[in-house]
Amino acid sequence: MGKIDELIQQYCPDGVEYKSLSEIATSWIRGNGIKRDEVTAEGQPCIRYGEIYTTYGLYFEECVSHTSKDVIANPKTAKKGSILFAITGESVDDIATSTAYLGDADIYVGGDILIMNHNQNAKYLSYVLSTVYAKKQKSKGKIKSKVVHTKKDDIASIVIPVPPLPVQEEIVNALDKFAELEAELEAELEAELEMRRKQFDYYKNSILSFGSDIGAWNEKD
């Protein structure tokens, strides 16, 4: 954290500013419905709100879904750096889950998604919007029900720390390194777990054969 502290002292010695999303947004766009039967394997890249919960993490570069340009009468698009909020969800805790789009091509955005464009570091915004402090603001005033909704004004009122861009970039670099390390550890643990499973199966089968396979337990070839 030393370099981050140094940059804070350099760029904002009086402290980091806190701003609402309405103060940093350059535009808000409401997505336009893309029906399930309008999704195709190829064509124009697109995103539907449910995929923000189930498919994408804090950021993504490529869409898993596509659609035909001919079936969307009034398409709404996200560009590189856009923050996408799911404004419909199944729980108070998950409402307004967001992801940053980092791909180069513009993508079509389905209904129940709110697009926020801005001039900040997109990954920084995605990281800070996933903190417990931001999540508390997202769920404030929401009532538990089968379907939970939010709206632009609620999202726009969320307050986050907004340091200068060099500080944002260094924070992203630090968090990316932690994320990479976590992924490496998970891969190593998964490999270790798979080896232990194989050992368990081997010893289970060996021990329970009681020294004789008895024709592989009388199995017929």
Image: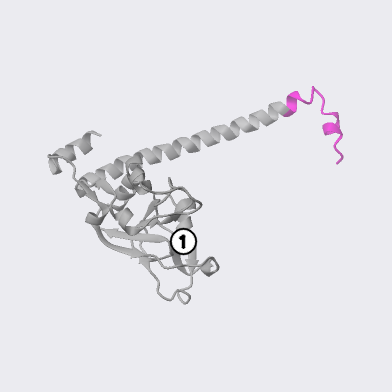
In the displayed structure, would residue 74 be above or below residue 146? below
Rendered residue at 40%/56% (across/down)? 87
Q: Quadrant of residue 207?
A: top right
Relative side of 145 to 154, left or right: right
Residue 65 among magenta residues: no
Q: Position of residue 29 (x, y in %)?
A: 33, 65
Q: For mark 1, give the secondary structure.
A: loop
Image quarter where the N terminus lies is: top left
Q: Nearer the viewer, residue 83 or 168?
A: 83
Pointer 1 residue: 48
Q: Quadrant of residue 218?
A: top right
Q: Nearer the viewer, residue 191 or 55?
A: 55
Q: Colour mode?
A: one colour
Image quarter where the C terminus lies is: top right
From this viewpoint, is residue 119 visible?
no
Q: Nearer the viewer, residue 52 or 200?
A: 52
From this viewpoint, is residue 90 visible?
yes
Q: Position of residue 13 (x, y in %)?
A: 12, 39
Rendered residue at 20%/36% (across/down)? 5
Q: Position of residue 91 (x, y in %)?
A: 47, 48
Residue 218 among magenta residues: yes
Q: Nearer the viewer, residue 219 or 165?
A: 165
Relative side of 54 to 126, left or right: right
How many numbered marks does the figure carry? 1
Q: What's the residue type where badge 1 is placed?
A: Arg
How crowded pointer 1 is (Cα within 10 Å; few <14, some 14-19, many 20+) is rated as: many
Rendered residue at 36%/64% (across/down)? 30
Rendered residue at 12%/40% (across/down)? 14
Q: Position of residue 84 (x, y in %)?
A: 37, 57
In the displayed structure, would residue 206 be above or below residue 44? above
First to last magenta residue range: 205-221
